[in-house]
Amino acid sequence: MDLEKRISLTLRNTAETVTREELRVLLETRTRPKAYWGFESSG
Amino acid sequence: MHVGIGLVPGSKIKDMIEAGFEFIVFLADWHSWINNKLGGQMENIRTCGEYFKECFTALGIPPGRAQYLWTSDIAKDIEYWEKVIRIAKTASLQRTWRALPIMGREMSLTDMETAWVYYPCMQAADIFQMELDVACAGMDQRKAHMLARDAAEKLDWRKPVCVHTPLLMGLQRPETGEGQFDEDTRINLQISSKMSKSVPTSCIFVHDSPETIEKKIEAAYCPPKQAIGNPILELAKHAVFTEKKSLEIPRPAKYGGTETFGSYKELEEAYVKGKLHPLDLKNGMVEALTEILKPVREHFRNHPRNLKRMMELEITR
Protein backbone atom coordinates (compact mmCIF):
# COMPACT_ATOMS: atom_id res chain seq x y z
CA MET A 1 0.00 0.00 0.00
CA ASP A 2 1.40 3.42 -0.88
CA LEU A 3 2.28 6.00 1.74
CA GLU A 4 -0.54 8.45 1.00
CA LYS A 5 -3.13 5.69 1.29
CA ARG A 6 -1.68 4.54 4.63
CA ILE A 7 -1.75 8.12 5.94
CA SER A 8 -5.31 8.77 4.79
CA LEU A 9 -6.53 5.45 6.28
CA THR A 10 -4.96 6.36 9.62
CA LEU A 11 -6.37 9.90 9.62
CA ARG A 12 -9.91 9.32 8.38
CA ASN A 13 -12.72 9.89 10.88
CA THR A 14 -10.35 11.24 13.51
CA ALA A 15 -10.78 14.39 15.58
CA GLU A 16 -7.09 15.24 15.90
CA THR A 17 -3.62 13.80 15.37
CA VAL A 18 -0.61 15.01 17.35
CA THR A 19 1.17 15.55 15.07
CA ARG A 20 0.36 14.82 11.45
CA GLU A 21 3.97 15.54 10.48
CA GLU A 22 5.25 12.98 12.99
CA LEU A 23 2.77 10.43 11.67
CA ARG A 24 4.01 11.00 8.13
CA VAL A 25 7.64 10.57 9.14
CA LEU A 26 6.75 7.40 11.07
CA LEU A 27 4.95 5.83 8.12
CA GLU A 28 7.72 6.89 5.75
CA THR A 29 10.38 5.18 7.84
CA ARG A 30 8.55 2.13 9.23
CA THR A 31 6.54 -0.51 7.41
CA ARG A 32 5.08 -2.00 10.59
CA PRO A 33 4.87 0.58 13.39
CA LYS A 34 3.24 -0.34 16.67
CA ALA A 35 0.00 1.20 17.93
CA TYR A 36 -2.45 0.60 20.76
CA TRP A 37 -5.82 1.48 22.17
CA GLY A 38 -6.50 1.01 25.88
CA PHE A 39 -9.94 0.10 27.20
CA GLU A 40 -11.28 0.21 30.72
CA SER A 41 -13.59 -2.63 31.63
CA SER A 42 -16.90 -1.04 32.37
CA GLY A 43 -19.43 -3.24 30.62
CA MET B 1 -19.95 -2.37 25.27
CA HIS B 2 -21.83 0.39 23.48
CA VAL B 3 -21.38 1.36 19.81
CA GLY B 4 -19.33 4.43 20.82
CA ILE B 5 -16.62 1.90 21.73
CA GLY B 6 -17.40 -1.07 19.50
CA LEU B 7 -17.80 0.85 16.26
CA VAL B 8 -15.77 4.08 16.65
CA PRO B 9 -12.48 2.63 18.00
CA GLY B 10 -13.39 -0.65 16.29
CA SER B 11 -13.35 0.82 12.78
CA LYS B 12 -10.25 2.95 13.49
CA ILE B 13 -8.34 -0.12 14.70
CA LYS B 14 -9.30 -1.96 11.50
CA ASP B 15 -8.16 1.04 9.40
CA MET B 16 -4.80 1.06 11.13
CA ILE B 17 -4.27 -2.68 10.81
CA GLU B 18 -4.98 -2.25 7.10
CA ALA B 19 -2.46 0.62 6.98
CA GLY B 20 0.21 -1.78 8.25
CA PHE B 21 0.21 -1.19 12.00
CA GLU B 22 0.93 -3.89 14.51
CA PHE B 23 -1.98 -3.24 16.85
CA ILE B 24 -2.40 -3.93 20.56
CA VAL B 25 -5.87 -3.93 22.10
CA PHE B 26 -5.01 -3.16 25.69
CA LEU B 27 -7.45 -4.40 28.32
CA ALA B 28 -6.74 -2.06 31.20
CA ASP B 29 -7.68 -4.21 34.18
CA TRP B 30 -5.54 -2.39 36.76
CA HIS B 31 -6.77 1.01 35.51
CA SER B 32 -10.38 -0.19 35.83
CA TRP B 33 -9.62 -1.32 39.37
CA ILE B 34 -8.23 2.12 40.24
CA ASN B 35 -11.30 3.74 38.66
CA ASN B 36 -13.61 1.51 40.76
CA LYS B 37 -15.23 -0.02 37.69
CA LEU B 38 -17.52 -3.00 38.32
CA GLY B 39 -17.29 -2.51 42.06
CA GLY B 40 -13.49 -2.47 41.84
CA GLN B 41 -13.58 -6.29 41.84
CA MET B 42 -10.75 -7.69 39.72
CA GLU B 43 -12.66 -10.89 38.92
CA ASN B 44 -15.55 -8.89 37.43
CA ILE B 45 -13.17 -6.59 35.60
CA ARG B 46 -11.46 -9.59 33.99
CA THR B 47 -14.83 -11.01 32.92
CA CYS B 48 -15.66 -7.69 31.32
CA GLY B 49 -12.27 -7.64 29.56
CA GLU B 50 -12.99 -11.12 28.15
CA TYR B 51 -16.40 -9.89 26.99
CA PHE B 52 -14.71 -6.88 25.28
CA LYS B 53 -12.31 -9.23 23.51
CA GLU B 54 -15.24 -11.31 22.24
CA CYS B 55 -17.09 -8.19 21.04
CA PHE B 56 -14.07 -6.86 19.12
CA THR B 57 -13.34 -10.31 17.71
CA ALA B 58 -16.91 -10.55 16.38
CA LEU B 59 -16.58 -7.04 14.91
CA GLY B 60 -13.57 -8.10 12.83
CA ILE B 61 -10.56 -7.78 15.17
CA PRO B 62 -9.75 -11.37 16.17
CA PRO B 63 -6.54 -12.27 18.05
CA GLY B 64 -4.10 -12.75 15.20
CA ARG B 65 -5.15 -9.50 13.53
CA ALA B 66 -4.46 -7.67 16.78
CA GLN B 67 -2.70 -8.61 19.98
CA TYR B 68 -4.75 -8.56 23.19
CA LEU B 69 -2.80 -7.57 26.29
CA TRP B 70 -3.86 -6.86 29.87
CA THR B 71 -2.31 -4.31 32.24
CA SER B 72 -1.60 -7.37 34.44
CA ASP B 73 0.68 -8.71 31.69
CA ILE B 74 2.94 -5.66 31.66
CA ALA B 75 2.60 -4.72 35.35
CA LYS B 76 4.50 -7.88 36.30
CA ASP B 77 7.68 -6.19 35.16
CA ILE B 78 9.44 -4.00 37.75
CA GLU B 79 10.63 -1.76 34.89
CA TYR B 80 7.01 -0.80 34.28
CA TRP B 81 6.74 0.61 37.80
CA GLU B 82 10.06 2.37 37.42
CA LYS B 83 8.57 4.16 34.38
CA VAL B 84 5.44 5.06 36.38
CA ILE B 85 7.61 6.76 39.01
CA ARG B 86 9.86 8.46 36.45
CA ILE B 87 6.80 9.92 34.69
CA ALA B 88 5.28 10.97 38.02
CA LYS B 89 8.50 12.83 38.79
CA THR B 90 8.25 14.88 35.58
CA ALA B 91 4.78 16.28 36.27
CA SER B 92 3.25 18.45 38.98
CA LEU B 93 0.39 16.97 40.99
CA GLN B 94 -1.93 19.59 39.50
CA ARG B 95 -1.00 18.55 35.96
CA THR B 96 -1.52 14.85 36.69
CA TRP B 97 -4.83 15.58 38.39
CA ARG B 98 -6.10 17.40 35.29
CA ALA B 99 -5.27 14.36 33.16
CA LEU B 100 -7.47 12.08 35.27
CA PRO B 101 -10.45 10.49 33.58
CA ILE B 102 -12.26 10.52 36.92
CA MET B 103 -13.28 14.13 36.69
CA GLY B 104 -16.25 16.35 36.37
CA ARG B 105 -17.21 16.23 39.99
CA GLU B 106 -16.47 18.87 42.53
CA MET B 107 -14.80 16.80 45.18
CA SER B 108 -13.19 17.57 48.46
CA LEU B 109 -9.71 16.20 49.21
CA THR B 110 -11.16 13.76 51.71
CA ASP B 111 -13.28 12.08 48.99
CA MET B 112 -10.42 11.53 46.58
CA GLU B 113 -8.45 8.33 46.47
CA THR B 114 -4.67 8.63 46.41
CA ALA B 115 -4.70 5.71 43.94
CA TRP B 116 -6.27 7.94 41.28
CA VAL B 117 -3.03 9.87 40.86
CA TYR B 118 -1.36 6.71 39.55
CA TYR B 119 -3.86 6.43 36.71
CA PRO B 120 -2.50 9.00 34.20
CA CYS B 121 1.07 8.03 35.10
CA MET B 122 0.26 4.40 34.33
CA GLN B 123 -1.52 5.39 31.10
CA ALA B 124 1.68 7.14 30.02
CA ALA B 125 3.91 4.29 31.23
CA ASP B 126 1.81 1.77 29.21
CA ILE B 127 2.87 3.57 26.04
CA PHE B 128 6.59 3.40 26.81
CA GLN B 129 6.54 -0.09 28.30
CA MET B 130 4.92 -1.52 25.14
CA GLU B 131 7.32 0.56 23.00
CA LEU B 132 4.48 2.08 21.01
CA ASP B 133 4.83 4.47 18.10
CA VAL B 134 1.18 5.57 18.14
CA ALA B 135 -1.31 5.89 20.99
CA CYS B 136 -5.00 5.98 20.06
CA ALA B 137 -7.95 7.08 22.17
CA GLY B 138 -11.13 9.12 22.21
CA MET B 139 -10.84 12.90 22.65
CA ASP B 140 -11.59 12.56 26.37
CA GLN B 141 -8.19 10.87 26.92
CA ARG B 142 -6.05 13.47 25.15
CA LYS B 143 -4.66 15.01 28.34
CA ALA B 144 -3.09 11.72 29.47
CA HIS B 145 -1.46 11.47 26.04
CA MET B 146 -0.14 15.02 26.28
CA LEU B 147 1.29 14.10 29.67
CA ALA B 148 3.04 11.13 28.01
CA ARG B 149 4.45 13.33 25.23
CA ASP B 150 5.77 15.89 27.72
CA ALA B 151 7.29 13.15 29.87
CA ALA B 152 8.94 11.65 26.78
CA GLU B 153 10.56 14.97 26.00
CA LYS B 154 11.85 15.42 29.54
CA LEU B 155 13.10 11.84 29.85
CA ASP B 156 14.47 11.65 26.31
CA TRP B 157 12.16 8.75 25.45
CA ARG B 158 10.47 8.24 22.07
CA LYS B 159 7.50 10.57 21.77
CA PRO B 160 4.30 8.77 20.74
CA VAL B 161 2.16 10.09 17.90
CA CYS B 162 -1.39 10.46 19.25
CA VAL B 163 -4.50 9.72 17.19
CA HIS B 164 -7.78 10.84 18.75
CA THR B 165 -11.26 9.96 17.57
CA PRO B 166 -14.45 11.96 18.12
CA LEU B 167 -16.74 10.92 20.95
CA LEU B 168 -20.04 9.52 19.82
CA MET B 169 -23.02 11.47 21.17
CA GLY B 170 -25.61 9.80 23.34
CA LEU B 171 -29.07 9.32 21.83
CA GLN B 172 -30.69 11.88 24.08
CA ARG B 173 -30.83 15.63 23.51
CA PRO B 174 -27.30 16.99 24.13
CA GLU B 175 -26.49 18.65 27.42
CA THR B 176 -25.12 22.13 27.63
CA GLY B 177 -21.76 21.59 29.30
CA GLU B 178 -20.54 23.47 32.33
CA GLY B 179 -16.82 23.37 31.63
CA GLN B 180 -16.23 20.59 34.11
CA PHE B 181 -14.32 18.18 31.83
CA ASP B 182 -12.23 20.47 29.67
CA GLU B 183 -11.50 24.19 29.40
CA ASP B 184 -12.26 23.97 25.68
CA THR B 185 -16.05 24.46 25.38
CA ARG B 186 -16.31 22.32 22.26
CA ILE B 187 -14.44 19.37 23.77
CA ASN B 188 -16.35 19.82 27.01
CA LEU B 189 -19.70 19.58 25.22
CA GLN B 190 -18.50 16.44 23.44
CA ILE B 191 -17.48 14.79 26.69
CA SER B 192 -20.61 15.79 28.62
CA SER B 193 -22.98 14.53 25.88
CA LYS B 194 -21.09 11.38 24.94
CA MET B 195 -22.72 7.98 24.81
CA SER B 196 -22.28 6.57 28.27
CA LYS B 197 -23.23 3.38 29.98
CA SER B 198 -24.17 5.35 33.07
CA VAL B 199 -27.04 6.87 31.05
CA PRO B 200 -28.69 3.69 29.70
CA THR B 201 -31.16 5.49 27.40
CA SER B 202 -28.17 7.13 25.65
CA CYS B 203 -26.65 3.83 24.51
CA ILE B 204 -26.94 1.20 21.86
CA PHE B 205 -25.04 -1.86 22.99
CA VAL B 206 -23.19 -3.98 20.45
CA HIS B 207 -25.12 -7.04 21.69
CA ASP B 208 -28.58 -5.38 21.55
CA SER B 209 -31.36 -7.30 19.79
CA PRO B 210 -32.87 -5.84 16.59
CA GLU B 211 -36.03 -5.01 18.58
CA THR B 212 -34.03 -3.11 21.21
CA ILE B 213 -32.05 -1.23 18.55
CA GLU B 214 -35.34 -0.24 16.91
CA LYS B 215 -36.90 0.89 20.18
CA LYS B 216 -33.86 3.00 21.14
CA ILE B 217 -33.49 4.64 17.72
CA GLU B 218 -37.22 5.38 17.59
CA ALA B 219 -37.01 7.17 20.95
CA ALA B 220 -33.81 9.07 20.08
CA TYR B 221 -33.55 12.82 19.70
CA CYS B 222 -33.42 13.70 15.98
CA PRO B 223 -34.25 17.34 15.22
CA PRO B 224 -35.50 17.79 11.61
CA LYS B 225 -33.23 19.58 9.11
CA GLN B 226 -30.50 19.92 11.75
CA ALA B 227 -27.11 18.21 11.58
CA ILE B 228 -25.28 19.79 14.50
CA GLY B 229 -26.15 18.12 17.80
CA ASN B 230 -28.18 15.44 16.04
CA PRO B 231 -27.26 12.06 17.59
CA ILE B 232 -28.75 10.00 14.74
CA LEU B 233 -26.73 11.79 12.07
CA GLU B 234 -23.64 11.57 14.31
CA LEU B 235 -24.25 7.85 14.60
CA ALA B 236 -24.53 7.60 10.80
CA LYS B 237 -21.28 9.50 10.37
CA HIS B 238 -19.13 7.83 13.02
CA ALA B 239 -20.62 4.36 13.34
CA VAL B 240 -22.25 3.47 10.01
CA PHE B 241 -20.28 5.11 7.20
CA THR B 242 -17.07 3.98 8.91
CA GLU B 243 -18.26 0.38 8.52
CA LYS B 244 -20.34 0.51 5.35
CA LYS B 245 -19.88 2.21 1.99
CA SER B 246 -23.51 3.27 1.76
CA LEU B 247 -26.69 3.72 3.76
CA GLU B 248 -30.01 2.56 2.36
CA ILE B 249 -33.15 4.38 3.45
CA PRO B 250 -36.22 2.19 2.95
CA ARG B 251 -39.21 4.37 2.09
CA PRO B 252 -42.69 3.71 0.69
CA ALA B 253 -43.02 4.64 -3.01
CA LYS B 254 -45.49 7.42 -2.19
CA TYR B 255 -42.79 9.20 -0.17
CA GLY B 256 -40.14 8.88 -2.87
CA GLY B 257 -39.17 5.21 -2.61
CA THR B 258 -36.00 3.63 -1.27
CA GLU B 259 -32.93 5.82 -1.51
CA THR B 260 -29.25 4.94 -1.13
CA PHE B 261 -26.65 7.41 0.08
CA GLY B 262 -23.06 6.76 -0.90
CA SER B 263 -21.44 9.11 1.59
CA TYR B 264 -22.21 10.87 4.85
CA LYS B 265 -21.96 14.23 3.09
CA GLU B 266 -24.76 13.31 0.67
CA LEU B 267 -26.90 12.08 3.54
CA GLU B 268 -26.38 15.24 5.59
CA GLU B 269 -27.14 17.50 2.64
CA ALA B 270 -30.42 15.74 1.89
CA TYR B 271 -31.38 15.80 5.57
CA VAL B 272 -30.62 19.47 6.14
CA LYS B 273 -32.57 20.41 3.00
CA GLY B 274 -35.58 18.53 4.38
CA LYS B 275 -35.48 15.95 1.57
CA LEU B 276 -35.15 13.19 4.15
CA HIS B 277 -37.62 12.86 7.01
CA PRO B 278 -36.28 12.01 10.52
CA LEU B 279 -38.49 8.90 10.63
CA ASP B 280 -37.10 7.58 7.33
CA LEU B 281 -33.54 8.31 8.48
CA LYS B 282 -34.24 6.39 11.69
CA ASN B 283 -35.67 3.41 9.80
CA GLY B 284 -32.54 3.25 7.63
CA MET B 285 -30.30 3.51 10.69
CA VAL B 286 -32.14 0.68 12.48
CA GLU B 287 -31.53 -1.60 9.50
CA ALA B 288 -27.88 -0.56 9.08
CA LEU B 289 -26.98 -1.00 12.76
CA THR B 290 -28.88 -4.28 12.99
CA GLU B 291 -26.80 -5.58 10.09
CA ILE B 292 -23.43 -4.23 11.33
CA LEU B 293 -23.97 -5.72 14.80
CA LYS B 294 -25.24 -9.08 13.56
CA PRO B 295 -21.89 -10.92 14.09
CA VAL B 296 -21.88 -9.85 17.76
CA ARG B 297 -25.41 -11.19 18.34
CA GLU B 298 -24.51 -14.42 16.58
CA HIS B 299 -21.36 -14.85 18.63
CA PHE B 300 -23.20 -14.44 21.94
CA ARG B 301 -26.03 -16.69 20.80
CA ASN B 302 -23.44 -19.47 20.49
CA HIS B 303 -21.20 -18.40 23.40
CA PRO B 304 -23.46 -16.68 25.92
CA ARG B 305 -21.30 -17.21 29.04
CA ASN B 306 -19.49 -13.87 29.42
CA LEU B 307 -22.40 -11.76 28.19
CA LYS B 308 -24.65 -13.52 30.71
CA ARG B 309 -22.14 -12.87 33.49
CA MET B 310 -21.95 -9.21 32.48
CA MET B 311 -25.75 -8.90 32.59
CA GLU B 312 -25.80 -10.48 36.05
CA LEU B 313 -23.16 -8.01 37.25
CA GLU B 314 -25.30 -5.13 35.98
CA ILE B 315 -28.35 -6.39 37.87
CA THR B 316 -26.55 -6.89 41.18
CA ARG B 317 -24.79 -3.55 41.01
Image (cartoon, helix red, strand yellow):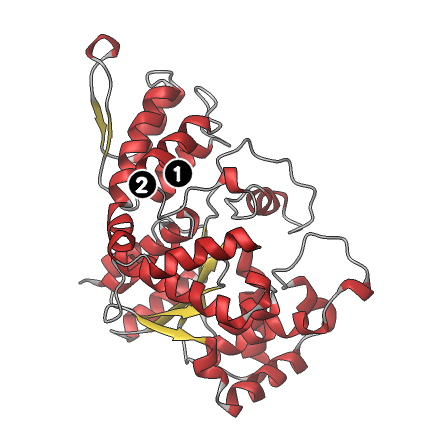
Circles 1 and 2 on the same subunit: yes
Closer to us: B246 or B25: B25
Assign a secondary structure to mark 2. helix
Q: Which residue is mark 1?
A: B235
Indicate the chain on which mark 1 is placed: B
Quadrant of the rendered structure where residue B120 is?
bottom right
Percent across and percent down for residue A28 are 28, 70
- Between the residue at mark 1 and the residue at mark 2, the CA separation in whole angstroms equals 7 Å
Question: Crowdedness of circle 1 by 10 Å Cα count: few (<14), some, many (20+)?
Answer: many
Q: Residue at x 63, y 48 (%)?
A: B184
Q: Earlier in the sequence, mark 1 or mark 2?
A: 1
Write down the chain letter for disc 2: B
Q: Residue drawn at (34%, 33%), measured in percent from left and top?
A: B211
Instruction: Tell whether A4 sits left or right of B149.
Output: left
Query: In this rendering, would B166 be left or right of B57?
Result: right
**Residue B277 on image: x %, y %:** 36, 17
**Coordinates of residue B206 in the picture (x, y in percent):** 36, 48
Discs 1, 2 touching: Cβ within 8 Å: yes
Q: Secondary structure at mark 1?
A: helix
Q: Which mark is residue B8?
A: none
Residue beneath disc 2: B240
**Residue at figure coordinates x 55%, y 55% from the top left:** B316
Confirm whether residue A17 shows in the render: no
